[in-house]
Image: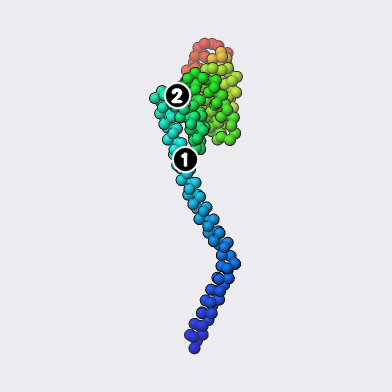
Amino acid sequence: MANQDDSFIREVNEELRSEQVKAVWTRFGSVIIGIAILIVIGTIGKVGYEYWHETSASQSGDQFLAALTLSKENKTDEALAALNTLEKDGYGAYPVLAKMRAATLQAQKGDTAAAVQVFSDIAKDASLPQAMRDAARMRAAYLLVDTGTYEQVSAEAEQLAVPANGLRHSAREALGLAAYKAGDMAKAKTWFQQIADDSETPRNLANRAQMLLDLITASGKAS
């Protein structure tokens, strides 16, 4: 008798649970289906975006390497055309990299002023990563060593010549070279000495700085 009672109770409980599930589904079924659909759409969107991201980045990378190859083969005009296309249609950081490389080719063709302007504009673009902006600023400074004044070089490089900046060694060299070219040996000596005294200066750069320090000392014009 007890077994029959237990069986009856289980059947009643199962029936109650079934009725509860039906009631919940009747009330919230459309919401549950909607949430499920959103989860599926979200997953598909995420996978699709990742595929698009990887594919777009890969295509832009291939285009950039192809442009660099054209440049190495001295096909400057073709390289510039490829870089201009990548600047307009590229993905991620490649449009800016293409712009910088195109500016370098412009400088090689003799249009240094235009190249400096491009690098300077990139350096001022707050939407770009700081490292990229600093690299552009440094490139402008080196170009200005040959074509500009010390003040112009300083406007680009001096803010990078501080102890915490990873480009300080190159910035100090550009400033020292600009001062040396301008005939300001005292200022040139100061910058080259900072390079020589910095234990983290790359060896080749430190050697160049020391050579110029020796020349300045031999000239007797630094006092």
Which residue is painted at 58% across and 65% down in the image? 28
Q: Amino acid at mark 2?
A: Asp
Q: Residue at x 54, y 56 (%)?
A: 38
Question: Where is residue 108 shown, x and y percent of the image?
Answer: 47, 21
- Residue 187 visible: no
Mark 2 — residue? 77
Relative to 76, say whether 126 is above or below.
Answer: below
The residue labelled by disc 1 is: 56
Residue shown at 55% from the left, 76% from the top: 16
In the rendered view, tell whether residue 189 sits above or below residue 121.
Answer: above
Q: Name the quarter where the C terminus is drawn.
A: top right
Q: Earlier in the sequence, mark 2 or mark 1?
A: 1
Q: How many numbered marks have been drawn onto this rendered protein structure?
A: 2
How far across and how far down the image is residue 3, in percent? 48, 85
Pinpoint residue 219: horizontal percent, then vertical percent. 52, 11
Say whether residue 126 is visible.
yes
How far, Cα to Cα, is label 2 from label 1?
25 Å
Mark 2 crowdedness (10 Å alpha carbons): few <14, some 14-19, many ≥20:
some
Q: x and y percent of residue 54 in the render? A: 46, 42
Q: Which mark is residue 155?
A: none
